[in-house]
Amino acid sequence: MALDIAFWILAVVSVFAALAVVLLRNIFRAALSMMVCFLMVAGLYATLGADLLAVVQVIIYIGAISILIILSIMFTRDVWQASSSSVVGLPAIVASVLFGGVVIFLTLNSRWQTAAPAAPQPTTSSLGASLFGQAGYALPLEISAGLLLAAVIGAMVLVREK
Amino acid sequence: MTVGLQHYVVLSAILFSIGLYGTLGRRNAIVVLMGIELMLNAANISLVAFSRYLTPPALTGQVFALFVIVVAAAEAAVALAIIMTIYRNRRTIEVDKIDLMKW
């Protein structure tokens, strides 16, 4: 089935890209492989039938956040290679492997009440209805607008030359 | 074997663990931030997969994923501003050298 093949390709590529993000010595290459990982996650959203989220992922993560990260890597250029070794090498590896192992074990051993997935519908109009509708998420939407405004003003105040 | 909910949740756990290692184990503050973004992405995959396989008509998981993306964008902007301010003042962005408030 085409969706299964797409899932396996996206999953393998995204795991390798994520490994490259945390293991590569060159931070610029790490940022580029982070963009690859975000693109694969957008593809995973598409295989899950979340069309709007896939587009939002490409626009915000690849278009905005990655560019912001690459820009700040270029601003802090002379400390690129200095970040080679890790602060707490072995404890970090143990903690992350332990966490991943526990979550995978619990996932494989719990009985999910999965419903049969329906054929994917366009989700944009129903997402908009649940965001702006009567019994929806209008208040969190307004709060997130305030959060974005506060973040923009805070970032500008922080990086302003005194 | 057809791909189901467990595949997506296991993939999300793997990506989260990789991001956790990047956050805990690397020195460069920008790599730490990239690890955090990886973890947020992994959580989003779980949310969308649960929304597709557990509650198919309701799109609650996708709405939550949208809010997570919004908060991640705000967090990235503020975190990178903090990193650039620290770099301007102390000429380093290595997290073990930023020990001004360490007792």
Image (spheres, rainbow, N blue to C red):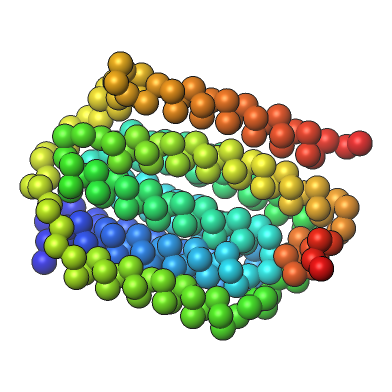
Residue at 60 percent across and 72 percent down: it is B25
> Would residue A105 be visible to someone looking at this image?
yes
Rendered image quadrant of residue B63: top left
Q: Position of residue B84 (x, y in %)?
A: 77, 49
Q: Along the line of sight, which residue is nearer the eye, A83 or A111?
A: A111
Q: Position of residue A58 (x, y in %)?
A: 44, 41
- Taking the view exactly as shown, the residue that stands out farthest to the front is B103
| Quadrant for the N terminus of chain B in the image | bottom left
Q: Position of residue A61 (x, y in %)?
A: 50, 43
- Taking the view exactly as shown, the residue that stands out farthest to the left is A116
Q: Is residue B71 above or below residue A43?
A: above
| Number of marks present in the image shown | 0
> Would residue A16 be visible to someone looking at this image?
no
Q: Along the line of sight, which residue is nearer the eye, B32 or A26?
A: B32
Rendered image quadrant of residue A126: top left
Q: Position of residue A1 (x, y in %)?
A: 11, 56
Residue at 32 percent across and 53 percent down: it is B46
Residue at 40 percent across and 21 percent down: it is A138
Left or right relative to A10: residue A96: right
Q: Is residue A96 above or below residue A141?
A: below
